[in-house]
Every structure is written in C-alpha cells, then in structure tokens.
Image (spheres, coloured by chain):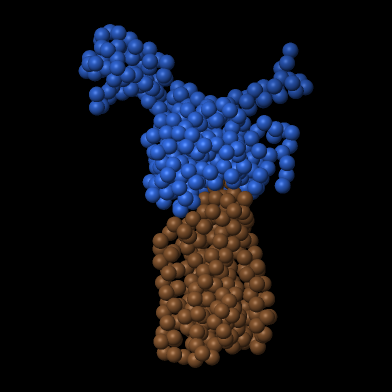
Amino acid sequence: MTRTSSAEAGRVVVVDALSTRHARLARATLTATFEAGVHALVGGPRDGGPLLLSVIAGRALVRSGRVRVLGEAPGSHAIRRRVGWVPSAPSLPEAMRVHEVMALAAVLRGEAAAPTVERLAALGLEALALRRVRSLTLEERRAVALAEALTSTVVRVLLLEEPLVAVDPRAAARVVELVRARGADGCVALVATASVRDAGVLADDHLLLRQGALVGRTPSLDLLSDLTPSGARLRVVASDPLALVTALAKEADIETLARRDGFVLARGPDATRLAAAVGRAVVSSGVDVVEMRLDPLTLDEARAAAADTTQATFEAARARALAAFVSGAPGGSRP
Amino acid sequence: MIAALARPALLQLARTPRAWLAVLSWGLLGLALAALARSLGAPNGADHVLVDGFGSLVTPLLAYALTSGALGGRSLAGSTAPVIALGGSPARAAFATTCVAVASASALAALVGAAVAAVAHGVDDPPVVRDALTTAYACALGAGAYAAMFAVGSTFGRGGGGRTLLLLVDWVLGSRRGWLAVLTPRGHLRNLLGGAPPADLPERASAGIVVALIVLFAAIAVWRAHRRAS
C-alpha cells in the first residue's frame, strides 16, 4: 500500500491514466484529480461514469493506471469505511429493519452513535425506520442508502450514481442541499449522471465523458450554452403566448421559435443576446411573464461544446508556445 | 466487530420463513424415521436410523438448508456485499457469515440428532442418555463440516450454485469406504455414528479430521469470498 505523495496532498481522489478491465473504460485512459467539493461525471452508463465510481469504491478491477483515494489504494479496509457508495441498485441487508441497518453501518464505519431516526430525518425518511429492507421499493432503498452515506460523519468520499433519479420523493427534495453541504464540509462528492440539468444543480465541477474518455471539464454548464453550435434556448411562460411569439418574430437575434404546451421556446446565437431579445419582445408585447428559464443543454451539445473549448484551449496554448519559441530562438524576430 | 458482521446472516436465518420451513421439514423427516424404527421394535433402532437415514440424508440436507438460509440463497460474496458496502471488511464479513452457518448447523443437527437417538432407542442400543450425547457430538461435528463445505461451494457460481455440486460430490465420494471418502464429511460422520469407517480410520481420527475439515473449508471460503469482493 503506497502512501500519498506530497504533491497529492489535498487531492482526495486521484485517477491517473486509468483503464479498467471492463470494456467501457478499456478503450480510453482517464486522468483526473478531485478535491473537496461536488464533482459531476456527466455521461450515460456507457460513458463510464458509474464504472469509474465502482473503481474508486474498490469494486471494479483496474487494468492499468493508478487510483488513490485519501492517499490509499481503493478498497483497502481503512478507506472502505470512509467511502459512501450509492449505486443505482444499492445492496442492503435484506432481513434487517432500516434502523438496524443504520446502526450496523455506524458500527462498521466506527462512528459515534447517533439516533438513527435523526439521521433518516435528514432526508425525511423517519417513517421508514421500522420497515424491513426487503419490503422497501427501489426508490426507498436508494433513499435509505443515500441517507446513510450523506449523514455519516466518517465518510469523506461520496460516490453517488444518479442521486436525483429513482429516489423516494421525500428524499429527492433534500438531496441537493445535503450533497452540497457535504461538499462544502470538505468531502469529495462524485456524482455520475446522464442529466445535464442534475449535474448543473448538484455540482460546481463538471467532467464530460464519452465512451470512457474525458472530453472536457468545466465549472459551469451554463457557460457552455454560449459555445454550442446550436446556440442557447430560452423557455418562457407568458400570459399571452401568441402576442409574445409575434413580438419575438420581429427580433433579429431569434433564430427559431416554437410554441408548445403553453410555453414559448426561443433559440438564439448565445444566452446574452437571446435574453436581450426576449426582454425587448416582452416589453413591446406588454405580456406578463410567469416563468423564464434557460433550457439546459442536451448531453451531446454539452460534450460538443466542451470538446470544442478543450480543442480551442489546446490550439491557443500551442500557438503561444510556438510564438514564444520563435521569438526566443537565435535569429528570431525579437527586437 | 465480528458479532456486528454476523448479525445480518443471523437475522437472515431467523426472519426468513422459507429457511425455517426447509429446516423443519428435514428435522421432522429425521424424527419420523426414528418413530418408524421404534414402532417396528428394532433392537438397535437408533443405530440403524442414525447411520442409514439421519447421518446420510437428514444431516447434510439440514446443513444445506441452514447454509442457504444464512446466505439468503445467494453466493457468499453476494450475501456479504451489503455489509461491505457499509464499510465492513470482506474477509471478516465472509468469516462471520460462515461462522453463523457452521454454528447454526452444528447446534440444530446436535439437537435433532439427540432427539432421533432418544426416540429410536432400542433394547440393544447403548444407554439412552449416553447415546443421545454421543450422537449430538457426532452430528454437531458432521453438520459443521457440511456447512463449512457448503460455504466453500457458495463461492462458486453467480448464485452460489457450487454448494449443490458439492452436495452431490459428497454423496458420490463419501458413500465409498476408500481414501476419497476421507475428504468428505459423509464418510467421517458415518464413522462417528457407528457405521463403516472411511479408509479404516478410528473414530478419534475421524473426529480430528472433521475439525480440520471445518477449519480448512472455512479458510478457503473466506479467502475466495475476499478475493471475489476485492
């Protein structure tokens, strides 16, 4: 077991040139470091997000590369109790009651005894305390697993697969707040999701994955909407949709318009110009706006924008390096 | 820690009616065989029932039902996955689960074995109390070895189907009297209950080998479950 190097101090999870034995991450090698905070691995199951979580949890085999969790190899006993892994179908002791599971987890993780009902109440699940695990639905089971991981004082690494999908509705409303609180508290929370919207709501750091490869990393998915070839989309619910559409049609910055189920969907070259055009149309038509929000990017749009940004950054860095080399070389054009 | 890790397997056994139904059925079969021997007035009824019916049929199936029950009908790695996900060590979880299977099989087989010896007691059998105690000790050892062997079998196959395979292997190899029977619980249990010994081993040697088999099988089961979970 190798201890962390000083260069890795502060980086809670380090993934270095990783490829796994599983086909989904076998074709590409992945390098990324994660510090305290909430990080989203954006991509479908085939893009390797859930698999990366199971590698970090020590439950999937690595073919090459290196993974370090809190400075240790994943899956070691010291690390296992500090990792809260909630996959899409979490495994809980079937014959136990929910409060017994919480008590067992507290013993195994070595944390100070805390009233299990209070821990469940953090996600509004106190009513499940006396239920047997085998009687729980998948949504309730996921909510219990989330409550256990999110309220543990020992867990420093949270690995959550689609935490806002197939979760008991009582818990879903509180998950975002709790995950963000743990991230602010010094934990690393890695969230694997195929939803760009969920990633935007949960995380401050977004890694866009495609077939196991990292195509881009961005702190804000909204910023990417300005960079997509298809532009930004704004969804407006107004008192008189027809009047708004008529006014929007006169705006030069509006590229396409659609009216669906009581809302108006407008597309423009970027978010700023689109918002300005909609604002002008609202004023000129005199309609009341009930709701107005930027439509999130689709997964493919986000990945394309992130890939373009990465490529552009690389090109700019190469151009700068080339310019520095030319100007610094003997006989160069430096004055 | 081991007690905490054993709790899920214990509760799995205690709270699963299907597991108890199987255990009850095999126990009743043993008692029915004993009652039949008694009603026929066999002079050494206990000997016959224990060697031919209880030792060769009921004890392995009782241990099989209890091991499957403790594991929730899954593989050893599958049954310990929930506690590992909650931060438990794979090796310790596998050890605790195997201990639950071995201890419950031993205790129950000893209890039912003693009852069978008492019910089927004939005039030519040894004194009833001594016979019941000897039977309990032999059945406890035999069922423990079976449970440990089934724990090894549970590390093979997705749902732990290897335990059924080992039940058949024990049936085939253990029914003979040669050296291959030394590797099976069946041959030694038969010897301990007063039947034909495997490879002409004395009873004391069989008892020692059974204890060694329990330790060996448990170690293999823990090692394999740990390897699969890591």
B201 or A172: nearer the viewer: B201
A109 with respect to A2 (left or right) = left
- Residue B207: quadrant of the picture: bottom right
Asked if residue B17 shows in the view, the reply is yes
Q: Residue at x 52, y 48 (%)?
A: A24
Q: Position of residue A128 (x, y in %)?
A: 41, 41
Which chain is tinted blue?
A
**Residue B101, placed above or below residue B44:** above
Q: Position of residue B217 (x, y in %)?
A: 62, 68
Asked if residue B158 shows in the view, the reply is no
**Residue A202, placed above or below residue A242:** below
Q: Farthest residue to the right: give it.
A: A330
Figure disc tally: 0
Q: Colour of chain B?
A: brown
Q: Residue at x 44, y 86 (%)?
A: B37
- Residue A37: quadrant of the picture: top right
Q: Position of residue A285 (x, y in %)?
A: 25, 10
**Residue A304, placed above or below residue A94:** above
Q: Residue at x 48, y 43 (%)?
A: A99
Q: Position of residue B173 (x, y in %)?
A: 56, 82
A88 with respect to A334 (left or right) = left
